[in-house]
Image: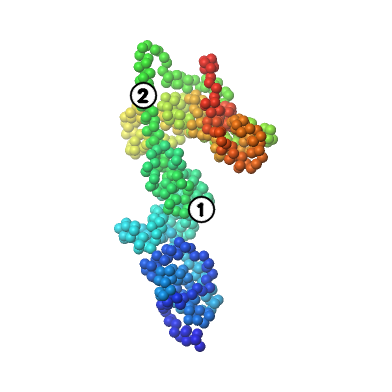
C-alpha cells in the first residue's frame, strides 16, 4: 500500500529532489576520475545540474530514491550544494534488472565530445571573451591548464582533428602531432594510420626527427617559450617527447646554418688578419710558397693521394662510371670467437664510421675556405661534383646568399652572386665543400680528403653506450684491451665484470673512476684500422720522420 501511495505521488515529468533523499544505485561503473569530478564540480557550481539524473524508488521500500543514471552529477552536486540542496531528477518505476540494463547501456553508448571538438568550442568562447583567458576559464568552468591544452589542440590541421573526432586516433596521437609544424602533420597522420602505430611507437618515431637543443650552437633565448620546444609541450600535454628537444627541424636547421655562417665569418676575418701578418713578415724578401698553392697542388695530385692512402683499408675507386660508389672493403667476420679482431669489429660499424667521418670532413671544410675550394676543384675535375644533391644547397640559399634569393629570376641571381663580398663568397664555397663531403657517393673519396686535410673525428664523436651495445662480450673485451681499459682496472677485475650481465659490463666500462673514453678511437672507427689514442698520449714524431 505504501509503495502504491508513493507511486501515485511520483511526478511523470522532471521533479526536484533533495540530495539527501537520493542514494547510490546498482552502478556497474566503479572508477570515477578525480580530475573529471573536479571539473564537473566547477561546472555545476557555475550553472547547476543542467541534465536531470534518473532515479527509481529505493528497493527497500523507504522514501528514498536510488540512482539509475547520473551518479557523477549527484556526487558533484552533493559537494557543491550539500545534502540539503536539491537537483532535478526524472523518477521511473524500474525493476532491479531494468535498472542494471539501463546503467550498462548508458555507460556503453555515451560518447563525450572529442578533445578537438572542445578545442574549437574553446576558441569561440575565447573570442567572445575578447581573448581574456581568465574570463574564458570562468565561463567554461575549466582549469587554466585545460584551456591551454585545448587551445594548443585547436592549432591541429583539419585532417588530424577529423581523425580524432572519428576516433581513428587517440588523444595521445593528437597531442604528439600538435607539437610539430602544421604543414607536416597530415603526412605524419598518414604514416600513423597506414602503419597502425600506437601512441608509444608514434612518440618513438617523433623522437627520431627532433633536434637536441642542448647540442645547438645558436642563442636559444627564443626557444624558451617556443611551442615547438618539447619542454613547453611537457607542461601542456600528458603525452610528449623528452625535454630539451626541438620538434621543428626546419627552424632548427636555419638557426644552425645562421650560427655556422656567423662563426665562419669570424674565422674568415681572423684568417685575413693572419695572412696580412704573414705578408708583412715576408716583406723582407722571404720567397716561401703560398699555403693555398701547396694545398691545391697536393689536392690535384690524385695519384700521390692514392699512394698515400694505401693503408687505410678502403678500396680505391676503379676506373668506370662515376655513379658506381666504392664502399669500405672489410673482410667477412669469422664465426668462431677466436676470429675477433679490429677488422671483424669494424664490420659491425661501417655505417656509423662513414657517417661520422663525413660529418667531421664537412665541418672541417665548412671552417676552412681554402680546403673547401681544393675539395671542390678535386670534385669538379674528377667528375663527382654533380653528386651534390640539388636540394642540399638550394634549400639553404636563402640563408647563404639572402632571404630574397630563392624568389629571384636567374639574371637577378647572377647579379646577386657577383655582388657578394669576398668573405661571404668564401663562406658559401665552404658550405659547398661541406655538402660534397656529405653527398659524394664513394666513401673512399671522403677518406682521402679526410687524411689530406688531417681531419680528426674526435671533435664530434666518442665512445658511448650506443656504440658499445652493438658488440658481443668478446668484442667488448677486444675494445677494452686496445683502448687501455683492461690495463687500467686489471685483467682479473675485468674478467669478473665479463662474467656478469652485459648491461652491467657496459655500465662498468663507461663509468670507471680515473678512466676517460674522451679522445680514444677504437680501431673500428679509424680509417687505417689502427687504434687511435688520445692526442696527449701520442708519441711526437721525430724531425727525420716528418722529413721522410
Left or right? Give the position of 400 relative to 34.
Answer: left
Residue identifier under label 1: 199
In three-dimensional space, the C-alpha distance between marks 1 and 2, rounded to whole angstroms, equals 54 Å
Q: Nearer the viewer, residue 469 or 446?
A: 469
Q: Position of residue 475 (x, y in %)?
A: 63, 35
Q: Mark 2 packing: few (<14 Cα in 10 Å), some, or many (20+)?
A: few
Q: Is residue 419 visible?
A: yes
Q: Residue at x 37, y 68 (%)?
A: 47
Q: Position of residue 90 (x, y in %)?
A: 44, 77
Left or right? Give the position of 88 relative to 130.
Answer: right
Residue identifier under label 2: 272
What kind of element bears circle 2? helix
User: Which comes sooner in the sequence, label 1 or label 2?
Assistant: 1
Q: Residue at x 37, y 30 (%)?
A: 265
Task: Tell me which corner region of the image, top left, top right, bottom left or bottom right, holds residue 350.
Answer: top right
Q: Is residue 519 above or below residue 47?
A: above
Q: What's the colour scheme?
A: rainbow
Q: Is residue 366 above or below residue 465?
A: above
Residue lying at the far bottom of the rendered structure: 1
Q: Nearer the viewer, residue 352 or 62?
A: 62
Amino acid at each position: 500500500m505504501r509503495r502504491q501511495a508513493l507511486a501515485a505521488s511520483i511526478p511523470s515529468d522532471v521533479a526536484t529532489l533533495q540530495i539527501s533523499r537520493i542514494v547510490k544505485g546498482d552502478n556497474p561503473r566503479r572508477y570515477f576520475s578525480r580530475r573529471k569530478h573536479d571539473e564537473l564540480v566547477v561546472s555545476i557550481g557555475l550553472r547547476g545540474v543542467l541534465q536531470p539524473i534518473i532515479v527509481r524508488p529505493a528497493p527497500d521500500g523507504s522514501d528514498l530514491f536510488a540512482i539509475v543514471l547520473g551518479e557523477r552529477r549527484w556526487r558533484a552536486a552533493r559537494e557543491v550544494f550539500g545534502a540539503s540542496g536539491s537537483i532535478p531528477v526524472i523518477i521511473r518505476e524500474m525493476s532491479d534488472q531494468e535498472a542494471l540494463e539501463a546503467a550498462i547501456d548508458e555507460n556503453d553508448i555515451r560518447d563525450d565530445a572529442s578533445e578537438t571538438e572542445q578545442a574549437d568550442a574553446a576558441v569561440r568562447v575565447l573570442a567572445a571573451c575578447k581573448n581574456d583567458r581568465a574570463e574564458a576559464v570562468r565561463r567554461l568552468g575549466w582549469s587554466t591548464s585545460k584551456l591551454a591544452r585545448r587551445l594548443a589542440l585547436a592549432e591541429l590541421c583539419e585532417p588530424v582533428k577529423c581523425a580524432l573526432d572519428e576516433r581513428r586516433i587517440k588523444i595521445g596521437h593528437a597531442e604528439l602531432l600538435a607539437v610539430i609544424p602544421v604543414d607536416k602533420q597530415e603526412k605524419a597522420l598518414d604514416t600513423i594510420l597506414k602503419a597502425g602505430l600506437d601512441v608509444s611507437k608514434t612518440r618513438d618515431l617523433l623522437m627520431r626527427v627532433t633536434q637536441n637543443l642542448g647540442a645547438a650552437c645558436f642563442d636559444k633565448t627564443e626557444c624558451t617559450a617556443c611551442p615547438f620546444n618539447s619542454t613547453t609541450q611537457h607542461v601542456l600535454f600528458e603525452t610528449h617527447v623528452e625535454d630539451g628537444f626541438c620538434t621543428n627541424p626546419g627552424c632548427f636547421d636555419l638557426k644552425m646554418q645562421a650560427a655556422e655562417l656567423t662563426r665562419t665569418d669570424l674565422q674568415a676575418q681572423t684568417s685575413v688578419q693572419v695572412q696580412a701578418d704573414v705578408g708583412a713578415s715576408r716583406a723582407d724578401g722571404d720567397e716561401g710558397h703560398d699555403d693555398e698553392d701547396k694545398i691545391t697542388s697536393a689536392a690535384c695530385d690524385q695519384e700521390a693521394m692514392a699512394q698515400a692512402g694505401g693503408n687505410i683499408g678502403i678500396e680505391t675507386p676503379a676506373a668506370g662510371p662515376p655513379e658506381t660508389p666504392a664502399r669500405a672493403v672489410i673482410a667477412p667476420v669469422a664465426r668462431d670467437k677466436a676470429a675477433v679482431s679490429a677488422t671483424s669489429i669494424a664490420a659491425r660499424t661501417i655505417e656509423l664510421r662513414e657517417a661520422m667521418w663525413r660529418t667531421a670532413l664537412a665541418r672541417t671544410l665548412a671552417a676552412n675556405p681554402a680546403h673547401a675550394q681544393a675539395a671542390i676543384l678535386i670534385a669538379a675535375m674528377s667528375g663527382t661534383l654533380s653528386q651534390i644533391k640539388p636540394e642540399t644547397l638550394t634549400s639553404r640559399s636563402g640563408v647563404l646568399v639572402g632571404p630574397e634569393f630563392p624568389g629571384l629570376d636567374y639574371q637577378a641571381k647572377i647579379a646577386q652572386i657577383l655582388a657578394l663580398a669576398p668573405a661571404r663568397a668564401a663562406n658559401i664555397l665552404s658550405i659547398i665543400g661541406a655538402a660534397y663531403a656529405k653527398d659524394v657517393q664513394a666513401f673512399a673519396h671522403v677518406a682521402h680528403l679526410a687524411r689530406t686535410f688531417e681531419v680528426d673525428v674526435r671533435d664530434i664523436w666518442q665512445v658511448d653506450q650506443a656504440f658499445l651495445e652493438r658488440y658481443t662480450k668478446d668484442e667488448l673485451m677486444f675494445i677494452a684491451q686496445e683502448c687501455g681499459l683492461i690495463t687500467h682496472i686489471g685483467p682479473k677485475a675485468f674478467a669478473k665484470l665479463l662474467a656478469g650481465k652485459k648491461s652491467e659490463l657496459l655500465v662498468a666500462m663507461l663509468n670507471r673512476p680515473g678512466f676517460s673514453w674522451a679522445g680514444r678511437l677504437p680501431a673500428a672507427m679509424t680509417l687505417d684500422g689502427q687504434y687511435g689514442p688520445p692526442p696527449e698520449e701520442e708519441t711526437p714524431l721525430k724531425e727525420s720522420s716528418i722529413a721522410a
